[in-house]
Structures are given as C-alpha cells and as structure tokens.
Amino acid sequence: MNKKITSKIAFNSGDYVVYPAHGVGKVADITKQKIAGSELELIVVNFDRDKMTLRIPMAKAETTGLRRISAESTMNDALGVLKGKAKVKKVMWSRRAQEYENKINSGNPVAIAEVIRDLYRSENLAEQSYSERQIYEQALDRLANEYAVCENISSADATKKLLDILAK
C-alpha cells in the first residue's frame, strides 16, 4: 500500500519561495523522478545568486521549511523590528554567533530582522569584528532579497531601504 503524500502548500512553476538555509529562490519546475525504485514528485528551485538548483521532494517541502514569500503583514513586522533598539546580550560571542546563525537559517523574516538590528553599526560607532560583519551581511542579504520580491523592487533598492530604516 503506497500512500501519496503531497505538501499542503501548492507551489507552481515561476513562484518565488524561501528555503531557510539558502534564502529566496524561484520554482523552476515541478517534476516526477524515479529514485531508488519509487517515483517522487520534486519541486525544482533555482537560486540564481548562488548558481544552485535544489530538488526537494514534495512530501518533504514543509518539513524542510520551504515556504512562499512572506505576506506584507509579516514583512511589516520585520521592518518594525528594525526600528527597535538593539538588544545585545552579555554572552560570549561564540554563543551569540550561533544564536544569530540559527535565526538566519530559520528563514523567519522577523528573526532575521532581529539579527540585523542587533549587529547594525552606524559609521560613528565602534568597528565590527570580521565574523560579526559576515553574519550581519548574510542576514541583511537574506532579508533584502525577500523584501525585494515582496515589494517588486531590485535587491539593491531593498537593501538601501532597509539601511535607511536602520539609520533612523
């Protein structure tokens, strides 16, 4: 008895999606492929920036965290977080870095915005370490890419808008 499991979320070719570990991608195709004797329905997602293609079984789409681009309300919540005051804990950097990485890889725009807010440094403040800068840029890139698709603007314009919010 072979049950066919499909995702509760319907993805179509051409849709923009977010894969938590890689950010924003575009569904290139939904195809069937025979793997290890069983036929699987796969979602083919292209990540142009990374020049990468990912094939995700439809049955595993939800458990991997694959989701549609955030709704406007979620994006507004994320932008609201950026306007807040930075909350830097007095914990060792390695522990904070791990926490930040987990938030980025969760794919949740609000959590990513928290990382950006906490690691943002204006020009007149102290320098960032290399690892702080890397994590900050990764988070900014992820949020900007999703914001760009959400607002139908270029990634560069989205980054500029996010930085303008942070500078206020």
Image (cartoon, rainbow, N blue to C red):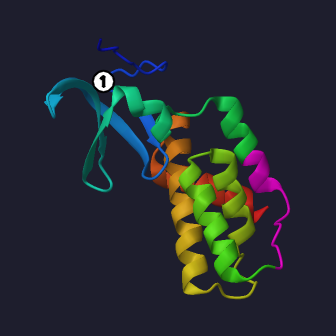
Q: Quadrant of the rendered structure where residue 45 is?
A: top left
Q: Is residue 108 magenta?
A: no
Q: Position of residue 116 (x, y in %)?
A: 67, 62
Q: Quadrant of the rendered structure where residue 124 is?
A: bottom right
Q: Is residue 36 left or right of residue 2?
A: left
Mark 1: secondary structure: loop
Q: Which residues are magenta?
A: 79-90
Q: Is residue 89 magenta?
A: yes
Q: Position of residue 139 (x, y in %)?
A: 57, 60
Residue under the image location 24 percent in, 25 percent down: 40
- For the C terminus, give its image quadrant: bottom right
Q: Quadrant of the rendered structure where residue 129 is?
A: bottom right
Q: Residues within 10 Å of mark 1 (few under 14, many from 20)?
A: few
Q: Which residue is mark 1?
A: 13
Residue under the image location 43 percent in, 21 percent down: 7
Q: Give above or below for 7 relative to 35.
A: above
Q: Position of residue 17 (x, y in %)?
A: 44, 35
Residue under the image location 52 percent in, 54 percent down: 142
Seen from the viewer's position, the closer of residues 157 and 62 is 62
Q: Give above or below for 149 relative to 136.
A: above
Q: Give above or below for 100 relative to 121.
A: above
Q: How many marks?
A: 1
Seen from the viewer's position, the closer of residues 9 and 85 is 9
Residue under the image location 85 percent in, 63 percent down: 85
| Residue 151 visible somewhere in the drawing | yes
- For the N terminus, give its image quadrant: top left
| Residue 152 visible somewhere in the drawing | no
Q: Is residue 20 left or right of residue 100?
A: left
Q: Position of residue 8 (x, y in %)?
A: 49, 18
Seen from the viewer's position, the closer of residues 17 and 105 is 105
- The amino acid beneath tag 1 is Ser
